[in-house]
C-alpha cells in the first residue's frame, strides 16, 4: 500500500522546520521538512511522490551559507492528513557525506520543541487548532485570552497565532505592540474573510489567514513562518 510506513531509520530525529526544494515531473517544488535526522527527513506535502522514487533535494540547512544538494529516496508516504500527521513523505538520504551528517546530528541534539502561543477564544475550534499544530510539528502550544495587556504576558515564542475575530480592538493593539518589539516574533492572524477593512488593518502588522480557516493554507503558512524563524535561530547555534 502506498500509505504504508517503513520504519527504516533508527537515528535520533528532531522536529525542525526547514525549506526543501525538489523537482517533480518538470516542476520545481518548494515544501518543508518537519522531521529531520542523519538518516533522512519527512516532507509535508499534499502530493507525496510514490514509494521508491529518487529525488534530488536542495535543503536549506542552518549553519550552511548555501543550500545543500542531497539525493534521497521515498521510503513511505501518507496520501492524506490523518491522526498520525499531515500528508507527506518520508525520505532516506542516499549519499550524505560525513561532515553534513555530523552537522545534522548537532542540529538534532540541540533542537527543542517549538513554542507556539494561540491568543484568542478558547473553544472547540481552538482545541482542534492545538491538535493540528502538534500533529504538524514538534511543538508546545499555549492558549491565552485576548484581553487588554496580554502583550506583557507573552514571552519569547517561535510563533504567535492571533484570533482577531473575537476581540478586534484588543487584537490590533496586541499586533501593533508585537510589531514594535525589539525582536518581533513571527505572527499569523486569523481574520474574517468577509471583513475586508479589518483584514487590511491587520495585514499592516501580520500575515493574515482568512476565516473560516482552510486547513491546508493554515499548514502552509505555519510552516513558512516556522521555517524562516528556525533557520535564523538555529544557524547561530549550529555554526558554533
Image (cartoon, helix red, strand yellow):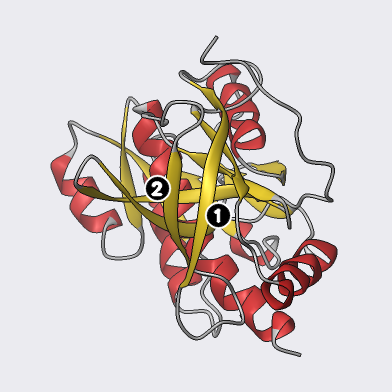
Is residue 55 placed above or below 135 in the rendered structure?
below
Is 70 left, or right, of 152 in this rendering? left
- The residue located at (51%, 15%) in the rendering is 2
Residue 139, can we see it? yes
- The residue located at (79%, 59%) in the rendering is 112
In this rendering, the count of numbered labels is 2
**Residue matched to label 1:** 160
Q: Nearer the viewer, residue 203 or 174?
A: 203
Quadrant hosting residue 25? top left
Classify mark 1: helix, strand or loop.
Answer: strand
- The residue located at (83%, 49%) in the rendering is 11
Which one is earlier in the sequence, the residue at label 2 or at label 1?
1
Residue 26: image location, x then y, percent: 19, 46
Residue 240: image location, x then y, percent: 76, 90
Q: Nearer the viewer, residue 6 or 206?
A: 6
Quadrant hosting residue 219? top left
**Residue matched to label 2:** 221
Amino acid at each position: 500500500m502506498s500509505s504504508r510506513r517503513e520504519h527504516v531509520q533508527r537515528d535520533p530525529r528532531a522536529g525542525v522546520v526547514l525549506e526543501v526544494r525538489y523537482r517533480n515531473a518538470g516542476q520545481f517544488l518548494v515544501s518543508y521538512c518537519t522531521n529531520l535526522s542523519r538518516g533522512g527527513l519527512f516532507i509535508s506535502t499534499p502530493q507525496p511522490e510514490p514509494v521508491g522514487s529518487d529525488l534530488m533535494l536542495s535543503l536549506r540547512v542552518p549553519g550552511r551559507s548555501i543550500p545543500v544538494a542531497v539525493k534521497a529516496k521515498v521510503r513511505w508516504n501518507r496520501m492524506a492528513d490523518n491522526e498520525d500527521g499531515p500528508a507527506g513523505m518520508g525520505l532516506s538520504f542516499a549519499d550524505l557525506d560525513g561532515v553534513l551528517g555530523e552537522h545534522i546530528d548537532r542540529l538534532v541534539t540541540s533542537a527543542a520543541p517549538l513554542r507556539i502561543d494561540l491568543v484568542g477564544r478558547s473553544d472547540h475550534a481552538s482545541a482542534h487548532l492545538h491538535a493540528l499544530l502538534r500533529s504538524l510539528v514538534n511543538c508546545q502550544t499555549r492558549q491565552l485570552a485576548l484581553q487588554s495587556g496580554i502583550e506583557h504576558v507573552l514571552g519569547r515564542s517561535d510563533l504567535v497565532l492571533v484570533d482577531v475575530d473575537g476581540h478586534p480592538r484588543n487584537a490590533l493593539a496586541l499586533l501593533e505592540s508585537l510589531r514594535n518589539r525589539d525582536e518581533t516574533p513571527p505572527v499569523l492572524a486569523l481574520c474574517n474573510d468577509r471583513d475586508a477593512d479589518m483584514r487590511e488593518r491587520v495585514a499592516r502588522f501580520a500575515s493574515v489567514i482568512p476565516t473560516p480557516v482552510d486547513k491546508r493554507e493554515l499548514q502552509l503558512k505555519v510552516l513558512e513562518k516556522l521555517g524562516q524563524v528556525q533557520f535564523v535561530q538555529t544557524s547561530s547555534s549550529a555554526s558554533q
